[in-house]
């Protein structure tokens, strides 16, 4: 269940995302993916889609394009129906031959530097490739709408985006007047990795009525040291259920006042772990952890 | 060597340890640090000193001392300036153990044990290969056997990592870069006990290493059972290195460079060389850890990278003098 976090962290060396022009509604050739390649909206909706990214796979299933997904990565196991789709292996440096073997007419990849070569080779084979990077909530919204246009499911895609936006607004309103504690978001232990300001998790914590002590770091995540965490002295430590026992019993972590006082917030990795269709649910669950009783 | 040089070695180590305790991300006044060391005063500062910095500096001392002793003993016994524990399969074997542990999802607590077992298996394999090749009394065969085992270990690591989960790859790579940042008192205690026994045993056989360093014929002429003596030193030195690797991952170049520095300071006899290498190795690793902490805050540079960055210029200078 931590795979998607690890996946998002591992992929943090990607080229700068190219912003999709909102005025592109009329000129489709102006649409570009996060590798800078132009996106063509096909005349007929794609019938065989390979999606090698948990977030895009979930979007496809959420907007009703799930039955047309013919391949997924080994990480896309959060949805039960997605598990039935053939597993084509890794999402980073994917197995191009396995993708070709699925005979796709659209391939969705994570826009990380590791995937550039594969994207090029698939395009050479005449397959439409769209590489997307989803670190932030805005990117999720942009990508959900884009995928909706690609698969001709624009209406459900808009409903999905609007529903999540409404949930996020509701949570933000519910926690607006409350005191805002500071949190350290523990993503990994060896090395110690913190969630930074570039991550959707930073946004979710903000919406849920708290402040990430590493919001000044521009990256989605970064290696930090325990002593630096102690210097920033968070009110709470947000940690996954798997990592919590080790933190509690570690004599090193006892040097952090929040751990010593038992102020650990154990988050639900299934809903908070990835920037996808569970964003609204994730914000609600974080708000309930940070401000019990604030959101119903 | 004159007592002044010994005093200098001890003072350098002491200064490094003080710097390692005083300097850190959190700036603390000296009085607060002294209170923390004594276990009084503000509990937060005390915990930073007692739970983070002191165990860390202590582990760095032990790892450096262990690698220094091990390298000095092996270079003397093998009569080879390039001999060091990592060249003899210890690092490769330990890395295979660690990578297997991470890719099989074994908890982090058991990783040091897996690394230690891996190192011992590799050392025994090198022994076995050398024996099968008929190494009686020839340290070069043992050395080559170690290189072969190391190469095999590298291949095994690549096979294991090629298809491992990203999380396992990350854990394994981090471990291979070496770190004393997660030191705990229980860990340093075990390593101290272990090094006291292993390092002590090497110092005790220091005279034998002196004789071995004369060459196997001369040593045999002096009545030494050369084959047994070489194996004994090889085994104990490898075990000492394996214990440091289990505690801190791969910290390269220390076992190779430190004995050269100490010899350059004029120490020749192996008992003194071993103790000198322990002191100098400890100083080097404490300084390298400190550098890694302050060079790029809030992140840290891996210890193994810093020791290599320090070690390479030393070795280049040594090479220039040789040619």
Image (cartoon, rainbow, N blue to C red):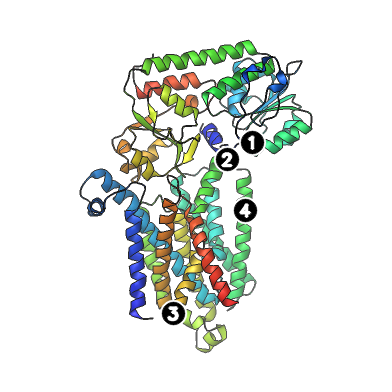
Q: Which residue is mark 3?
A: B266
C-alpha gap between disc 2 and disc 4: 16 Å
C-alpha gap between disc 3 and disc 4: 41 Å
The correct choice, above or below, for B55 with respect to B317 in the image is above
State the residue lying farthest toward the left: B40
Q: Which residue is mark 2?
A: B165
On the question of residue B217 being in view, the answer is: yes
Q: Which residue is mark 4?
A: B156
The chain containing the residue under callout 3 comes to: B
Frontmost residue, A252 versus B319: B319
Label 1: few (<14), some (14–19) or many (≥20) C-alpha neighbours in 10 Å = some
The chain containing the residue under callout 2 comes to: B
Quadrant in which residue B316 is drawn: bottom right
The x, y position of residue A235, in whole percent, is: 32, 32
Question: CB atoms at circles 2 and 4 under 8 Å apart?
Answer: no
- Label 2: which secondary element: loop
Same chain check for tags 3 and 4: yes
Give the mark count: 4
C-alpha gap between disc 2 and disc 3: 50 Å
Q: Which is more foreground, mark 1 or mark 3?
A: 3
The correct choice, above or below, for B174 with respect to A120 in the image is below
C-alpha gap between disc 1 and disc 3: 56 Å
C-alpha gap between disc 1 and disc 4: 21 Å
């Amino acid at each position: 269940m931590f795979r998607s976090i690890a996946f998002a962290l591992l992929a943090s060396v990607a080229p700068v995302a190219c912003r999709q022009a909102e005025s592109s509604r009329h000129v489709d050739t102006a649409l570009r993916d996060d590798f800078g390649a132009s996106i063509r909206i096909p005349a007929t909706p794609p019938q065989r889609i390979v999606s090698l990214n948990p977030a895009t796979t979930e979007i496809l299933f959420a907007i009703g394009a799930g039955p047309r997904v013919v391949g997924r990565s080994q990480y896309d196991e959060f949805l039960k129906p997605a598990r039935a789709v053939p597993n084509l292996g890794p999402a980073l440096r994917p197995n191009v031959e396995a993708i070709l073997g699925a005979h796709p007419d659209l391939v969705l990849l994570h826009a990380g530097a590791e995937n550039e070569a594969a994207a090029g080779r698939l395009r050479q084979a005449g397959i439409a490739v769209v590489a997307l990077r989803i670190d932030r909530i805005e990117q999720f919204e942009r990508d959900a709408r884009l995928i909706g246009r690609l698969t001709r499911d624009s209406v459900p895609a808009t409903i999905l985006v609007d529903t999540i936006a409404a949930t996020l607004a509701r949570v933000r309103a519910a926690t607006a007047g409350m005191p805002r504690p500071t949190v350290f978001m523990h993503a990994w232990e060896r090395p110690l990795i913190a969630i930074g300001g570039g991550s959707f998790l930073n946004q979710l914590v903000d919406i849920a009525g708290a402040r990430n002590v590493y919001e000044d770091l521009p990256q989605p995540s970064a290696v930090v040291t325990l002593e630096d965490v102690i210097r920033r002295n968070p009110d709470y430590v947000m940690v996954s259920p798997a990592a919590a026992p080790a933190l509690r019993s570690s004599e090193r972590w006892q040097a952090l006042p929040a751990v010593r006082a038992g102020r650990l917030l154990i988050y639900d990795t299934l809903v908070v772990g990835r920037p996808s269709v569970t964003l609204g649910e994730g914000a609600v669950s974080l708000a309930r952890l940070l401000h019990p009783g604030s959101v119903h | 060597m004159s007592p002044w040089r010994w005093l200098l070695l001890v003072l350098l180590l002491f200064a490094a340890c003080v710097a390692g305790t005083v300097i850190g991300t959190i700036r603390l006044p000296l009085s607060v640090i002294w209170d923390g060391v004594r276990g009084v005063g503000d509990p937060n500062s005390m915990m930073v000193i007692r739970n983070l910095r002191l165990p860390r500096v202590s582990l760095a001392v032990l790892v450096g001392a262990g690698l220094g002793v091990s390298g000095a003993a092996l270079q003397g016994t093998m009569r080879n300036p390039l001999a060091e524990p990592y060249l003899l399969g210890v690092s490769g074997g330990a890395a295979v153990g660690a990578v297997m542990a991470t890719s099989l999802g074994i908890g982090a607590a058991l990783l040091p044990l897996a690394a230690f077992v891996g190192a011992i298996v590799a050392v025994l394999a090198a022994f076995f290969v050398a024996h099968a090749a008929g190494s009686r009394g020839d340290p070069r065969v043992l050395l080559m056997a170690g290189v072969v085992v190391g190469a095999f270990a590298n291949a095994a690591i690549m096979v294991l990592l090629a298809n491992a989960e990203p999380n396992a790859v990350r854990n394994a790579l981090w471990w291979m870069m070496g770190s004393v940042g997660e030191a705990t008192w229980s860990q340093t205690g075990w390593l101290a006990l272990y090094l006291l026994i292993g390092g002590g045993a090497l110092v005790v056989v220091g005279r034998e290493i002196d004789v071995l360093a004369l060459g196997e014929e001369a040593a045999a002429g002096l009545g030494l059972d050369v084959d047994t003596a070489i194996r004994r030193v090889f085994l104990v030195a490898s075990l000492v290195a394996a214990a440091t690797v289990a505690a801190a991952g791969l910290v390269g170049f220390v076992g190779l460079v430190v004995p050269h520095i100490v010899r350059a300071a004029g120490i020749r006899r192996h008992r003194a060389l071993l103790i000198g290498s322990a002191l100098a190795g400890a100083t080097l690793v404490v300084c390298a850890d400190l550098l890694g902490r302050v060079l790029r805050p809030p992140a840290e540079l891996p210890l193994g990278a810093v020791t290599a960055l320090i070690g390479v210029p030393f070795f280049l200078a040594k090479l220039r003098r040789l040619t």
